[in-house]
């Protein structure tokens, strides 16, 4: 049985980790490299760094931060934000990242997924997807629409159909962030998570809304996620990665790497 993964997300703005609710009201919570090192030592299976203003500011991702993280973090890590072309992806991977996450760029230029997979291997290409509940319709049969630009721009794409197309193009993993639950700490959006997990043949990371260990167990058991992304739970110092994984194993019998 494959082990379920615990992934810590660090949203970075102006060189600092920030956290908000539904992409708004962000507050400073610390230095990204120091926090990532602490989480990796505490048992996180992977790390994700999102340079959340790079795309809006039309600049590349902070390569110095990527390189600094690579020197001090000894678990796989993904970077996203400000990746504008294959050259930016290559620079991030050469700086030490293990994977790159493509979100708005993939929607604007779907073929970048194929190009990236051919250049670096599909295991390096993560589709980042922000999805918002809009109700079932002919245009959105899943009931969820893809949004881009930090949740500000409706893409007109059904979330499940876009996930399937992205995998066909070359995405080797999907990180699904549900905007309606992001930062709320009331649980993941299980409906769309399960729909996409069951529709694609690549690992699915649940993101947006974890507040308790039970929420992670639900993502694994009820929504069939392969990994769970957390942020507020550990940024607030209410939980540790090691404690979460122990509880997942002991209480919920979820297979994790202890």
Image: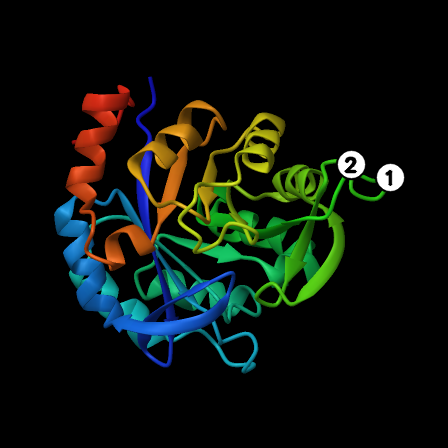
Q: Secondary structure at mark 1?
A: loop
Q: Quadrant of the C terminus?
A: top left
Q: Which of the image's four quarters has the N terminus?
A: top left
Residue 94, placed above or below residue 43:
below
Question: Image check: 11 left or right of 178?
Answer: left
The percent coordinates of residue 68 (x first, y second) are 23, 70
Whether 49 is drawn above or below 181: the answer is below
Does residue 234 appear left or right of residue 103 in this picture? Answer: left
Res. 130 in view: yes
Residue ID at (24%, 71%): 30
Q: Would residue 148 be found to the left or right of residue 95 on screen?
A: right
Label 2 close to label 1 by CB (< 8 Å): yes
Could you tell me residue 183's position as x and y percent?
A: 43, 56
How many numbered tags mark residues here?
2
Q: What is the secondary structure assignment of the residue under circle 2?
A: loop
104 on left or right of 94: right
Residue placed furthest toward the right:
138
Distance from disc 2 to disc 1, alpha carbons, whole Å, reads: 6 Å
**Image quadrant assignment for residue 149:** bottom right
Q: Is residue 122 above or below residue 113?
A: above
At x 51%, y 49%, the residue is 181
Q: In the picture, residue 93 is in which quadrant? A: bottom left
Circle 1 residues within 10 Å: few <14, some 14–19, many ≥20: few
**What residue would you read off at disc 1?**
138
* Image mark for residue 141: 2
Q: Residue at x 78, y 36 (%)?
A: 141
- To which quarter of the image does residue 249 belong? top left
Above or below — where is 235 with respect to 1?
A: below
From the viewer's side, name the closer residue of 1 and 121. 1
């Amino acid at each position: 049985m494959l082990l379920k993964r615990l992934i810590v997300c660090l949203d970075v703005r102006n060189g600092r980790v920030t956290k908000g609710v539904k992409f708004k009201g962000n507050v400073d919570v610390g230095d990204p490299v120091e926090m990532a090192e602490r989480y990796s030592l505490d048992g996180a299976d992977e790390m994700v760094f999102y340079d959340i203003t790079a795309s809006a500011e039309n600049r590349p991702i902070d390569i110095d931060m990527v390189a600094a993280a690579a020197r001090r973090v000894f678990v796989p890590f993904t970077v996203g934000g400000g990746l504008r072309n294959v050259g930016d992806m290559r620079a991030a991977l050469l700086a030490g990242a293990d994977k790159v996450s493509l979100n708005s760029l993939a929607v604007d230029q779907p073929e970048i997924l194929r190009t990236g997979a051919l250049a670096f291997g599909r295991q390096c290409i993560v589709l980042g997807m922000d999805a918002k509940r809009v109700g079932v319709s002919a245009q959105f049969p899943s009931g969820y629409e893809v949004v881009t630009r930090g949740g500000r721009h409706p893409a007109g794409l059904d979330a499940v159909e876009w996930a399937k197309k992205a995998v066909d193009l070359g995405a080797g993993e999907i990180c699904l962030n549900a905007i309606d639950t992001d930062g709320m700490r009331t649980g993941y959006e299980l409906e769309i998570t399960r729909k996409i997990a069951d529709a694609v043949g690549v690992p699915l990371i649940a993101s947006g809304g974890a507040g308790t260990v039970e929420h992670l167990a639900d993502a694994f058991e009820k929504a069939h996620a392969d990994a769970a992304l957390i942020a507020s739970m550990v940024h607030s110092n209410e939980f540790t990665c090691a404690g979460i994984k122990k509880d997942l194993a002991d209480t919920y019998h979820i297979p994790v790497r202890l």
